[in-house]
Amino acid sequence: MARRWVAARRHLAWAAVVAAPLVFLAVFFAWPLATVLARGLAGTGTGAAWEVLTSPGVPESIATTVVLAGLGTLGSVALGLPAAWALYRLRWRGQVAARAIVAVPFVLPTVVVAAAFGALFARHGLLGFAGLDQSVAAIVCALVFFNVSVVTRVVGSAWASLDPGAQLAARTLGASRSRAFRTVTLPAIAPALGAAAAVVLLFCSTSFGIVLVLGGTRVRTIETEIYLQVNQFLDLHAAAVLAVLQLVFVGAALALASWARRGRDRVANGRELDGSREARRGDRPWITATLATLGALIVLPGIALVERSLRVEGGGHSLANYAALVDPPARSVLPVTVAQAALNSVVTALIAAVIAAALTVAVSAATVRGPRWTRWIDAVAMGPLGVSAVVIGLGMLLTLNRNVAGVDLRTSWALVPLAQAIIALPLAVRILVPATRAIDPRLRAAAASLGASPWRAWRTIDARLLRGPVALAAGFAFAIAMGEFGATAFVARPDRPTLPLAIARLLSRPGAENVGMGFAAAVLLALVTAAVMLATERLRTRVRADV
Amino acid sequence: MSVVARGLLVASLTVTYPGRPPITAVDDVSLEVATGEIVALLGPSGCGKSSLLGAIVGIVDPAAGRISFDDSDITGTPIHQRGFGLVFQDGQLFPHLTVAGNIAYGIAALPKPARAERVAELLELVGLEGLDTRKVTELSGGQRQRVALARSLAPRPRLLCLDEPLSSLDAELRTRLADDLREVITASGTTALLVTHDPQEAERIAGRTLRMAAGRIA
């Protein structure tokens, strides 16, 4: 009897732990998503959905989505492969710094990346002569800039641990350098390459902020079309139909990713070894060419962005655009100062980070320590990753513009941090679950044998040891929330924009003054995000030392 | 019932692990440890001795059987209410606490002066005087096991369980520590159950040895 009572109490306790993230995800993720599906699929029989899909501009936007995702992925792989070889397979002085620089773009907010490439390709920009302003090519460049680090890191670490023996054997059998690469090396790194490409495909098909800002009125994807339907035509049904289409698209990319990852796990099961080698004289031209291309891709937009942010009307350079960030802009463009928008961002991102971190702690505990029936919570919490932020934002707009538990969400800004917490949750979970798993369960047994109740054991052992990882997860969540654009664009109130929204709006309206301010604000956002990421990365190395 | 009213009584205990077919690690085992006794459970690895110890301490749920102490049934009592100490093979010291913090963990309910006194007493008992503020990550293997022993003894457990407490140490240290271990346990008047695969260790420490093979006590 006593045993059954103890077991029942344990299950009850875990049910309470799981309830918080579950209810949160149900209300702010599953319900909105279900609403989008219901609204989008309603009336299929009457051909209403078909009407939306064939209406002017929509077929083009579908084609553009596919083309952008395909070219972005192709470009990232084409540049990432030699970069993986130069930065991971070979060893040379300054390599660590080069790796760090290549990793930078990935943590930048999409709006900042878009602003940088916009500055680069604008008529008076560094590469203005190419005539690529508001073109597919410019967006592809930005997508490659954003994603090349994924390919470099994933393929690079697989390549670095590859036994060089097989390739040497092929060479002794008479294979040329290129044939040895094609027939021996490439098949060995193919699973990693496939996995990286699938992830990049996912990111490229959900790059709403980049397309909206860089594409202007000329380049449209399914996501920007959804935004247009909501914001300009107020056609929520059409938006929902397109959102379902976007869901299918991302679902296909995800299926591809999991299929590719299966192959990668098989390879990863092999023994780990260091297959990197010292760079030789003959490698130099190749390293130089790779680094020059990477450098141009990564450094030029940054220079263009900073230069543009300093340029003022009349052609001179000054800090006037930065000074203007605290002045109220023309009322029609932005109802508040950029400084106020930045403050809004910091406040909402802080709330989002706290929510995400708290939920992540519960999710990790239930995933790692809970009874069997709570362990799938981990997979549930990863759900938002499989849905475009735009679709999440649209779903929240459709469902939560009403009273929920006495709070009128329509007139409050509460939806913004909630949406950002949903977007940040998967990454926070990916950081904290392994950290929780790394704590030896026998430490808790030791605490219990010394008389500690489960609650005291958690408080004095788990909570203490997880302090670093939780801060790390919260830091990442904060950075993501700071830069979040897709979902925020749908749920933010017009009179309370966040910094990314303010940047997008300033850049989209003509008028040299606005645009200059937009670029200055983009630099500000980049600096804030970079500072948070740097601080968090330092934390990560400290955490590693602890475990 | 049993002739031993005081001490540990295990009756027809069975531990199984899920699988196809389920694996029976402990098969209908009964044993007794009288108060003040040191009993060794000796057997090769995989014979089920650690599972048996786990069930007694409360880490492992038994499939059948009964565990009682001083004539009260504790089969369903959660681990932290059993009042049994446990020393792991690799110590499992809390990495974020000092030596003193580890030892004091189980006596948090005591007032501060009494707690400090008890910690000092135990440090002396295991021969680690003056190391109280040391980080546990800076200790040698032998010192770590001494701290683990002191930590388990601090709350004065009714029964001290030791799971291969010396097998992560090198041979010379093992012999020396085995003698120390017996002295410390005897000096503190603790009832103890030791699991080991080393017959010499069992003989050095325990007053009585039970041999275990294939989930049963021979």
Image (spheres, rainbow, N blue to C red):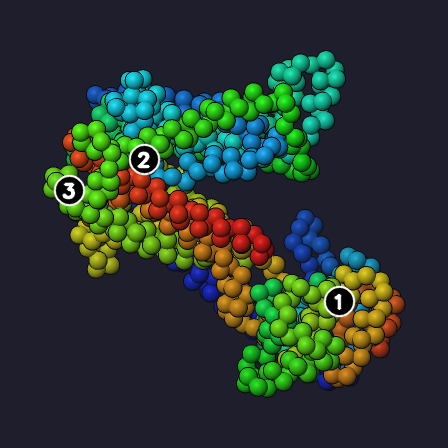
What's the distance in space between the residues labelled 1 and 3, CA to CA? 70 Å
Tell me the number on the disc at residue A329. 3
Residues at discs 1 and 3 in contact (Cβ within 8 Å)? no
A426 versus B136 height, above or below: above
From the viewer's perspective, is A518 left or right of A184? left
Q: Amino acid at mark 3?
A: Pro
Q: Amino acid at mark 2?
A: Val
Q: Is residue B102 visible?
A: no
Tell me the number on the disc at residue A306. 2
Q: Position of residue A508 (x, y in %)?
A: 21, 32
Q: Quadrant of the C terminus of chain B?
A: bottom right
Q: Chain of mark 1?
A: B
Residues at discs 2 and 1 in contact (Cβ within 8 Å)? no
Q: Quadrant of the N terminus of chain B?
A: bottom right
Q: Secondary structure at mark 3?
A: loop
From the viewer's perspective, is A388 left or right of B88? left
A528 versus B179 height, above or below: above
Residue under the image location 17 percent in, 52 percent down: A411
Q: Between tags 3 and 2, which lies in front?
A: 2
